[in-house]
């Protein structure tokens, strides 16, 4: 959007036109066919109230506007009309504007050239019109803010554009009828049976561009020259809007009208076109003669529909950045610019997402770096990860991801010389693309055509004999250590049926998940499974030793009995065991101490009288049992 140029206030200002914009106030919904003097927006800022007063509008009045003043008689011959304003704006000449804005300006200049002669005005009328134009543009800037673009004033004429954002209370459906008659996407007709009705929903519509050129006789005698452009409206609709703006001027000639034009386009244009519940996109009718002020865009629907969706998404994203949200991880309130929004539409604050991603990469969980939401399985895209992790950690994540992906592929092996990933062929052979070594993928030796491949156990036996004889080379020693490690690993582990990754179970059921390829398999029979129906056959979900361990963990009494039994067996050499009077669990004496403790029922008792001892100080003494005696 071009920058606004600064200018002095007053009727005799000759420099570029522009002023400081203030935030745009909210607008009230309008009736389907409001009067030209509909209620203006309730502006909270004093600048807006002052601007409305300059336009002779009462913010709280719903009555008709005052009648136009009688036209004064011309006292002097009219000067020659000034040349039309050039198609440039402050700050735009170097960077250039959008094609739609440039086309609207070009067409407006053409209309100005053929617009006819100016009305003869006196110097006082020219000065009064200039001041009223100045006040009107200041009011538009104060009310609509950045939606108003002021262009350089040349030749005494002001030119500006207003991006009219249509007010819709809720989301609205947009539909169109399409066909693929010649393989390309085109608008269809209502009678075609094979047409496809495409419908989508938006909450923000692309703005209607209103470009105005104010002649020196405005607003006392002539209306502003204007053009209307919108790429999602056809020429018949835009022509209808132009005709409606003419009617608004006819109803209040001699008054400033651009504010009423913008307000009517904003609040009532959809209802005027019959789009109260749904917007129907259609192609331009060739037979219909369009208004000269309608800037048409004959784009195909495969261009218009994505543009409307993209504009709606951009407005959603802009609203998200300006709002305050709660992070669902740390529950802190932050502005939208401090959040990371994922493609699954979940969002979390930048600090939490950065910690979450770095923690997962550090732990090696890179295959499925998912959304932190527990019920979502959406992945974090790489472009967001690169911003969160930084260059070094992102390169490590890419390397780990490539390594995990290659490890999960059944036909990928690594060269025994340079560890380059190679593609295994049908005959269990591979050729390294880096060092060109041709090797057997089973024994990892050079390719042996027609010879039987040795098993890892046979290779281990041969290498151990070579080691004993002292004829093992350095590379063979490394292979020997790898085979020994593999042998120890395979003693208490199983290989994943998909990627052959060795997995060892420490506890739990027999349904295992491979951490490398996420494949589910049975730890008992080593077959790939999908659910729990597999364990209705010969395989059991929980082995007996796991059930026993769980029973001991949950039943403290059983656990204590086992511990007591082990304790009694460990102290049999100290003498005979004494049964507990409560649970009959044998407990041995430690030395000559007759005060025993039962590990099973957690009770104290005496080895001499075999009675429970609640208080040792009362039980042992001159009148009771002796605490220390030797067994007979």
Image: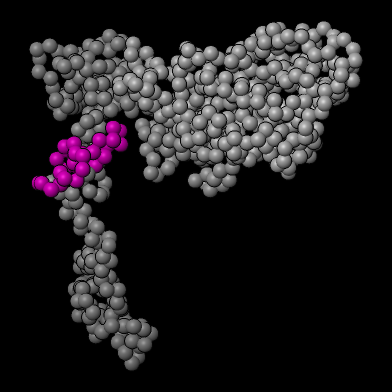
Q: Residue at x 12, y 11 (%)?
A: 449
Asked whether residue 94 is in view, the answer is no
483 lies above or below 124: below
Q: Residue furthest bottom?
A: 623
* Residue 187 % position (x, y): 41, 18
* Residue 394 % position (x, y): 47, 27
* Residue 428 falls left or right of residue 195: left
Let me know if residue 528 is in the magenta part. Answer: yes
Q: Residue at x 25, y 32 (%)?
A: 501
* Residue closest to the eye, 237 or 101: 237
* Residue closest to the eye, 286 or 212: 286
* Residue 279 falls left or right of residue 224: left
Q: Which residues are magenta?
A: 512-538
* Residue 476 % position (x, y): 24, 21
Asked whether residue 237 is in view, the answer is yes
* Residue 446 % position (x, y): 20, 13
Q: Residue at x 53, y 48 (%)?
A: 331
* Residue 23 falls left or right of residue 379: right
* Residue closest to the eye, 539 or 296: 296
Colour style of the rendered protein structure? one colour
* Residue closest to the eye, 616 or 446: 446
156 lies above or below 566: above
Let me know if residue 260 is in the magenta part. Answer: no
86 lies above or below 383: above
Residue 411 location, quadrant: top left
* Quadrant including the N terminus: top right
Q: Residue at x 77, y 35 (%)?
A: 66
Residue 269 location, quadrant: top right
């Amino acid at each position: 959007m071009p920058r606004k140029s600064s200018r002095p206030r007053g009727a005799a200002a000759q420099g570029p036109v522009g002023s400081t914009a203030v935030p745009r106030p909210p607008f009230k919904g309008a009736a389907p066919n409001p009067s030209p003097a509909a209620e203006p927006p309730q502006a909270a800022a004093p600048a807006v109230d002052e601007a409305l007063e300059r336009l002779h509008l009462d913010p709280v009045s719903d009555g008709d506007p005052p009648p136009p003043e009688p036209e004064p008689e011309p006292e002097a011959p009219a000067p020659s009309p000034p040349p039309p304003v050039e198609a440039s704006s402050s700050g735009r000449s170097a960077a250039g504007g959008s094609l739609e804005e440039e086309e609207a300006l070009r067409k407006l200049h053409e209309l100005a050239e053929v617009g006819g002669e100016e009305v003869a005005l006196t110097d006082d009328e020219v000065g009064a019109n200039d001041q009223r134009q100045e006040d009107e543009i200041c009011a538009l800037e104060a009310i609509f803010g950045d939606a108003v673009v002021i262009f350089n004033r040349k030749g005494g004429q002001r030119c500006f554009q207003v991006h009219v954002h249509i007010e819709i209370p809720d989301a609205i459906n947009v539909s169109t009828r399409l066909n693929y008659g010649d393989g390309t996407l085109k608008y269809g007709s209502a009678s075609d049976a094979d047409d496809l009705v495409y419908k989508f929903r938006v909450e923000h519509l692309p703005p209607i561009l209103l470009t105005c050129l104010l002649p020196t006789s405005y607003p006392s005698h002539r209306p502003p020259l204007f053009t209307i452009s919108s790429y999602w409206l056809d020429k018949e609709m835009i022509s209808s809007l132009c005709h409606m703006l003419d009617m608004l001027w006819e109803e209040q000639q001699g008054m400033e009208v651009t504010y009423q034009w913008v307000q009517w386009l904003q609040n009532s244009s959809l209802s005027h076109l019959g789009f109260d519940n749904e917007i129907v996109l259609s192609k331009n009718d060739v037979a219909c003669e369009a208004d000269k002020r309608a800037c048409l865009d004959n784009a195909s629907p495969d261009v218009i529909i994505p543009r409307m969706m993209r504009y709606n998404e951009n407005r959603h994203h802009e609203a998200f950045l300006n709002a305050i949200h709660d992070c669902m991880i740390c529950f802190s309130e932050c502005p939208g610019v401090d959040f990371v929004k994922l493609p699954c539409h979940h969002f979390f604050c930048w600090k939490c997402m950065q910690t979450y991603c770095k923690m997962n990469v550090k732990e090696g969980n890179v295959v499925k770096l998912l959304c932190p939401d527990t019920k979502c399985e959406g992945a974090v895209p790489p472009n967001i990860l690169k911003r969160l992790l930084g260059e070094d950690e992102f390169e490590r994540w890419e390397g780990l991801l490539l390594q995990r992906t290659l490890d999960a592929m059944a036909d990928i092996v690594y060269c025994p010389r340079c560890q380059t990933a190679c593609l295994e062929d049908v005959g269990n052979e591979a050729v390294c693309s880096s060092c060109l070594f041709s090797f057997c993928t089973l024994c990892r030796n050079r390719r042996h055509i027609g010879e039987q491949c040795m098993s890892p156990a046979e290779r281990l036996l041969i290498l151990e004999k070579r080691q004993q004889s002292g004829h093992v080379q350095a590379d063979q020693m490394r292979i020997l250590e790898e085979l020994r490690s593999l042998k120890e690993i395979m003693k208490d582990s199983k290989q994943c049926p998909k990627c052959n990754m060795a997995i060892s179970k420490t506890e739990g059921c027999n349904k295992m998940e491979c951490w490398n390829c996420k494949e589910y398999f049975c730890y008992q029979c080593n077959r790939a499974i999908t659910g729990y129906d597999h364990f209705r056959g010969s395989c059991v979900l929980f082995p007996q030793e796991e059930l026993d361990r769980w029973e001991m963990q949950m039943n403290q009494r059983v656990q204590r009995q086992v511990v007591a039994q082990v304790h009694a067996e460990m102290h049999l050499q100290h003498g005979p065991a004494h049964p507990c009077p409560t649970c009959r669990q044998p407990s041995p004496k430690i030395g000559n101490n007759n005060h025993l403790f039962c590990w099973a029922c957690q009770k104290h008792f005496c080895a001499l009288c075999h009675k429970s001892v609640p208080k040792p100080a009362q039980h042992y003494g001159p009148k009771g049992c002796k605490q220390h005696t030797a067994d007979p």
